[in-house]
Amino acid sequence: MKWLTVVLLLTVTISCVESESVSEKERGPLQISQNSDFLELPYGQPESSNFKSLKWGELTGSEKEKAKNEYIDFSIQSEAMASKILENIEPTNINNLYEAIPVMQKRIEEMRLTQDTFLAEQYVAFNIQRLLFNNQLFTVEDIDQNKNLYFDTTELALLEFSLELMVENGNPNAELMALNAFHLKDYIGNEKMKLLASSSISNAERWFSNEQNCINCEFKVKEEDQNAFKLNSVKEGIKYLSQF
Amino acid sequence: MKKRISVIVVILVAGLSSSLYSDPVCIWESPEGCIYRFHQGGADVNCGEGPIPLDSGQMGSCPGVEVHHY
């Protein structure tokens, strides 16, 4: 009977902790600061994916609302998939993540058979990237400083794994791919690097190919425009990746 | 009596486990029509051009308008 009381007490304690964290969330207003150095690193989408509601910006009326709701559902499902990929893995422990690479690969392969996993895979990849780059991947300065980091073979294996996930899933951030390539160029073979670089360039060109974000028509946007800032970074990334 | 206690314990442990493993995701739509998603790993925003992760300085906290558990 004693241990039943302990279990009951534990349940009550957990419930209290949970409601406290919800209150915490409800308290603060949402504040988005405008940082001129902020470098957008959007998640991408591979050509093979059939999901149509990632970008609803050009839609109107009920179509727009429908697409938004589909995106919301999809992002929640993707979060659940990412949690399953990382199940029983400590997501902030580099050694634990390294040892779990084959497990994650197997889980992803199985999920890919029945589900559209491109967003979930990028959630996992970004978690690893943030961990390896000390949570600093958002400004041009940060990316530049990250060139000075030293990675051991365990970290390089994780970097390679996360880079592959990003490239396979259409991630368009050529500047981030270039940073990865910079660190991995002596670790992975020339042929593989060439393939990853070429796919990264295609992903970037496909994502930024519409008129508003056209890579080859930067003269249409003003220099101080955020798009120009981002596109220049992407172009620098493409330039670096083109050497492989 | 023993059987009844076992059943209660199983229910309690199951409830406890599910509460430990259900990750909350808060989805919030701003007045500008952007969808913000707050989760354990951080936050991202989609204003119709595709989702973009936010850095910690931009994140703020979930206004708590809508909370999903899975």
Image (tube, rainbow, N blue to C red):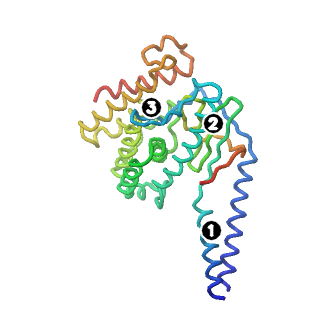
Which residue in the protein does label 3 denote? Answer: A173
**Disc 1 to disc 3, C-alpha distance:** 41 Å
Q: Looking at the image, which residue sits at the far bottom?
A: B1
Q: Looking at the image, which residue sits at the far top?
A: A219
Quadrant assignment, res A85: bottom left
Which residue in the protein does label 2 denote? Answer: B35
- Foreground mark, 2 or 3, reads 2
In the image, what residue occupies the spot 70% across and 62% down?
A: A17
**Chain assignment, label 1:** B
Quadrant assignment, res B18: bottom right
Quadrant (top left, top right, bottom left, bottom right) of the C terminus of chain A: top left
Look at the numbered disc 3 and give the secondary structure of its residue. loop
Counting labels gives 3
Look at the numbered disc 1 and give the secondary structure of its residue. helix
In the image, what residue occupies the spot 28% across and 42% down?
A: A188
The location of residue A226, given as percent across then percent down, is 56, 22
